[in-house]
Amino acid sequence: MEFKDILYSVEAGIARITLNKPEKLNALTWGSWAEIENAIAMAEADDAAKVVLFTGSGRGFCAGTDLTAGTKEADWPERLLAGRPGMMRSRYLATAQVYHCKKPTIAAVNGASVGAGFSLAMACDIRIASEAARFSAIFVKRAIVADTGCTWFLPRLVGMENALKMMYTGKLVDAAEALRIGLVSEVVPADELLSRATTLAAEIANGPSVAIELMKRLTQEGLTRGLDEQIEMEQFLQGITHNTEDAAEGRNSFLERREPVFRGR
């Protein structure tokens, strides 16, 4: 599949999705969101892709929705769901698809991440920021309600008070503040961002991917389960991992006192 607004590639277990409209700080049209949805679907269907890594071209991660775009819906890429299911599905659900991606996801935030672009970064499992990164729930500056899942993601990441403060004011939060409030897990110099994000992605990609994908599912679903039910589900899904080649390798490597070599099966 060819893309216009993003770059997509898979190498060494890492599916890279690069927002590629640097002249607009990678602001996204509805067509761009359709491309992201298609890229996520491709990564999920590809056993060679173990981790999905998002970043932006140029000096921005994503400036949110492109308010100047004038493209017609007929010119957008085909969306995942056609016909009546597509007609009834919200166009704003691309960030939910990123969040629900079966594979681990990482956002390497290289610059401004605002509005819907902020939601995209928050939809990823892990965020690593360059020192140049800036974050804003900028919707209030346009006198509109936050969208693309911002009101769901943000309080879960930084707590209710910090989330409401960001949404009430639209204030830009720099990388150091983002780290302090738990919005990102690391801050690195700008010229080290992709290297660090790739190193982390490679570490995850080289892990036991069946167990990792099931742990992602368990952790997300655990937000709405009680403790006893969650423990029972852990036990059930652990039974699946016990039968994998990677589990056998994990046991053998322990007995042989060496580092395991996992194959993702």
Image (cartoon, helix red, strand yellow):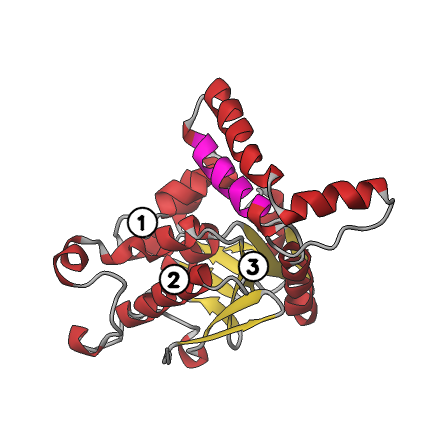
Residue 170, given in percent of the width and then of the height, sits at: 40, 51
How far across and how far down the image is residue 108, in percent?
A: 57, 62
Please identify the quarter of the rendering in which residue 239 is found.
top right
**Mark before the other along the chain sequence, 1 or 3:** 3
Q: Are marks 2 and 1 in contact (CB under 8 Å)?
A: no
**How far is mark 2 from mark 1, CA to CA?**
26 Å
Q: Name the mark nearer the viewer: 2 or 1.
A: 2
Q: Position of residue 204 (x, y in %)?
A: 64, 54
In this view, the residue in front, 119 or 236, is 236
Q: Are marks 1 and 3 in contact (CB under 8 Å)?
A: no
Closest to the observer, 74 or 213 = 213
Residue 120's quadrant in the figure? bottom left
Q: Main secondary structure of the magenta part?
A: helix
**Number of marks in the rendered image:** 3
Q: Is residue 203 above or below residue 15?
A: above
Residue 212 seen by the camera: yes
Label 1: how many Cα within 10 Å (few below 14, some 14–19, many 20+): some
Q: Secondary structure at mark 1?
A: loop
Q: Residue furthest top?
A: 228
Badge 2 is on which residue?
41
Q: Residue at x 43, y 45 (%)?
A: 166
Say which of 195 and 45 sits in front.
45
Q: Which residue is mark 1?
A: 146
What residue do we see at 41% from left, 66% from top? 42
In the image, 142: left or right of 136? Answer: left
As helix, strand or loop, the secondary structure at mark 2 comes to helix
- Mark 3 is surrounded, within 10 Å at the Cα level, by few (under 14), some (14 to 19) or many (20 or more) other residues, namely many
Query: How far is the residue under mark 3 from the one under mark 2?
Result: 13 Å
Tag 3 residue: 50
Magenta-highlighted residues: 211-223
Decide which of tag 2 and tag 1 comes sooner along the chain: 2
